[in-house]
Image (cartoon, rainbow, N blue to C red):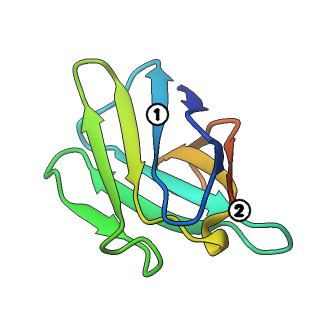
Amino acid sequence: VQLQASGGGLVQPGGSLKLSCAATGQIFSTDTMGWYRQAPGKDRELVARVFLESGTRAYGNSAKGRFTISRDNAANMLYLEMKNLEPEDTGVYYCNRNGLDGDWGQGTQVTVSS
C-alpha cells in the first residue's frame, strides 16, 4: 500500500487546515488508518486513527476537541481536519496504515506561526 499525504502548509495560530491522504493498493476492512506527527527534536506521536471495520475513532490528547479524522472508503481517502491550530501543532504529519510497523506516507509539513 502506498500513502500520499497532502494539504500541509503555513497557517497562523487559530487557523485551520485539512490534510488528505490518498491510499493506493489493497485496503482491508480490518485495517486501521491514522495520522501521526513528528515535531522537530521529538518522537513521532499519534494524532488520530480510525478503525475501518467499526468506524471507531481515537485521538491523541493534543488533538481532542480540535481535530477530526474521517475517511472515504470508496475513494480510499483519509482526512484530518484541524481547527484552532497552535504553534505546538507544527511538525510533519504522516499518513499511516496499521500502526508503527505498518505503512507510511512521505509526510506533509504543517507550520503554525504568526
37 lies above or below 70: below
Query: Measured from the top left, where is residue 97 in percent x and y?
Result: 48, 44
Give how far across and how far down residue 67 sits, in percent. Answer: 37, 61
* Residue 85 falls left or right of residue 77: right
Q: Nearer the viewer, residue 6 or 10?
A: 10
- Residue at left 66%, top 70%? 87
Q: Residue at x 30, y 73 (%)?
A: 65
**Residue closer to the observer: 68 or 111:** 111
Observer-nearest of 43 and 19: 19
Q: Residue furthest left?
A: 54
Residue under label 2, please give it: 113
Indicate the amino acid at tag 1: Ser
Image: 72 above or below 49 = above
Residue at position x 68%, y 41% from top? 107
Q: Which residue is mark 1?
A: 20
Instruction: Pick out the residue farthest to the right.
Output: 41
What's the residue type where badge 2 is placed? Ser
**Residue 82 in the image: above or below residue 86:** above
